[in-house]
Image (tube, rainbow, N blue to C red):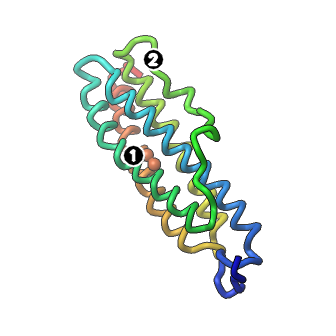
Amino acid sequence: MPVRSSSEGILSDERAEAREELIGMLKKAYFMELETVMSYVANSVNPDGVRAQEIKESLEGDIEEELGHARRFAQRIKELYGVVPGSEGFLAEQSFLQPPEEQTDVVHVIRGVIKAETGAIEHYTRIIEETEGVDPVTQDMVIEILHDEQGHRRLFEGFLREYEVEGIA
Ligand SMILES: [Fe+2]
Ligand SMILES: [Fe+2]
């Protein structure tokens, strides 16, 4: 391995420990995005009913975006000299986005999406804090992704609001 001097910031040898820690957070983010892709594919197909249509279409549009996030996290892991983990390292966490009992239960899906987006917002906010003054490139990337997730959550909060006003949620 070549010697990477301290002037190389997060890529320098003396930053190896900070880099490892950051890669761990990026791996978690990568898996979160891929689980979201799985959940959104299922929930863009399963729901039944007139009311479900809007939700399904919205989730369908998000799938590509979340997949794009996963790919950006993967790329960044490699740039930081990490290895993108294989599927055996994956542990499912989105218990709240499993298919509901009734496929007309759109509120269940909306709440699940809000929870998934909130989880992403929390984790990415942590990465942004951790990378402050440490790795501006990763920080920049994650700020952009965080912006997307905030937009997703806001949209679904609006959907939920409609149901609340009508007394359905
Ligand atoms: Fe995402
Ligand atoms: Fe999202």
Reading the chain from its start, which is encountered first: label 2 or label 1? 2
* Residue 16 in the image, given as x and y percentages of width and height: 74, 70
| 2 vs 1, front mark | 2
Residues 4 and 156: in front is 4
**Which element type, helix, strand or loop, lies under badge 2?**
loop
Residue found 61% across the figure and 73% down from its top: 135
Reading the image, the residue beneath label 2 is 100
Q: Which mark is residue 152?
A: 1
* Residue 56 in the image, given as x and y percentages of width and height: 30, 30
Residue at the farthest top position = 102
* Residue 92 in the image, given as x and y percentages of width and height: 59, 33
* Residue 52 in the image, given as x and y percentages of width and height: 29, 24
Residues 167 and 46: in front is 46
Around disc 2, counting alpha carbons within 10 Å, would you say few (fewer than 14), some (14 to 19), or many (20 or more)? some
Label 1 CB less than 8 angstroms from ligand 2 = yes
**Which element type, helix, strand or loop, lies under badge 1?**
helix
Where residue 147 sits, quadrant-wise, is bottom left
Q: Which mark is residue 35?
A: none
Residue found 61% across the figure and 57% down from its top: 83
Which quadrant is home to the C terminus?
A: top left
Around disc 1, counting alpha carbons within 10 Å, would you say few (fewer than 14), some (14 to 19), or many (20 or more)? some
Q: Is residue 79 left or right of residue 110?
A: right
